[in-house]
Each structure stands twice: as C-alpha cells, then as structure tokens.
Amino acid sequence: RIFPNFPILIPFWALATAVGVSLLTGLVFGVFPARRAAKLDPVQALSRR
C-alpha cells in the first residue's frame, strides 16, 4: 500500500449519488434503446437503405 495510514472515508450521500447516476446512465443508454430495438421488425431492421 502506498498510504497505509490514510483512512478512506466516503460520505453516504456521495455513494448514493454515484449509484444513482450509474443506474440512470445504464437505463438511458442501455435499456431504453434495447426496448425500442426489440419493437422493430427484424427484416426491416436488418435491411439496407
């Protein structure tokens, strides 16, 4: 360890904010586009225009 006597203290609000932002980012950039793509017709989605 580089700093053996340095305690790491993370406030609860910072941890909760980080988890919340991570969940929101995952939903916006993962789940929502996947749900929209799942509604498409596969033949139409794979066709080249």
Image (spheres, grey):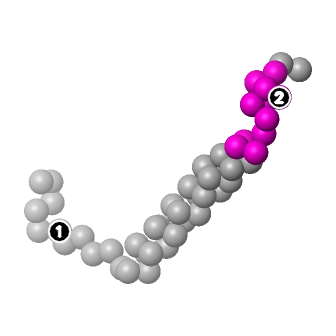
Residue at the image position 36 percent from the left and 79 percent from the top: 11
Q: Position of residue 30 (x, y in %)?
A: 60, 49
Residue placed most toward the observer, 1 or 21: 21
* Residue 9 horizontal side relative to residue 41, left or right: left
Q: Is residue 14 above or below residue 32?
A: below
Q: Secondary structure at mark 1?
A: loop
Three-letter code, disc 2: Gln
Q: Classify the position of the C terminus by image quarter.
A: top right
Marks 1 and 2, how far apart at CA: 58 Å
Q: What range is drawn magenta here?
A: 37-47
Q: Is residue 47 visible?
A: yes
Residue at the image position 17 percent from the left and 68 percent from the top: 6
Asked whether 24 falls inside the magenta stretch, the response is no
* Residue 48 horizontal side relative to residue 23, left or right: right
| Image mark for residue 48 | none
Which residue was labeled with disc 1?
Answer: 6
Of all residues shown, which one is farthest toward the top? Answer: 48
Residue at the image position 49 percent from the left and 73 percent from the top: 17
Residue placed most toward the observer, 22 or 44: 44
The quarter of the displayed image where residue 10 is located: bottom left
Q: Position of residue 2 (x, y in %)?
A: 15, 54
Residue placed most toward the observer, 24 or 13: 24
Q: Position of residue 1 (x, y in %)?
A: 12, 54
Badge 1 density bin: few <14, some 14–19, many ≥20, Cα 10 Å: few
Q: Position of residue 42 (x, y in %)?
A: 75, 31
Q: Is residue 9 above or below residue 3?
A: below
Three-letter code, disc 1: Phe
Asked whether 45 falls inside the magenta stretch, the response is yes
| Image mark for residue 44 | 2
Front disc: 1 or 2:
2
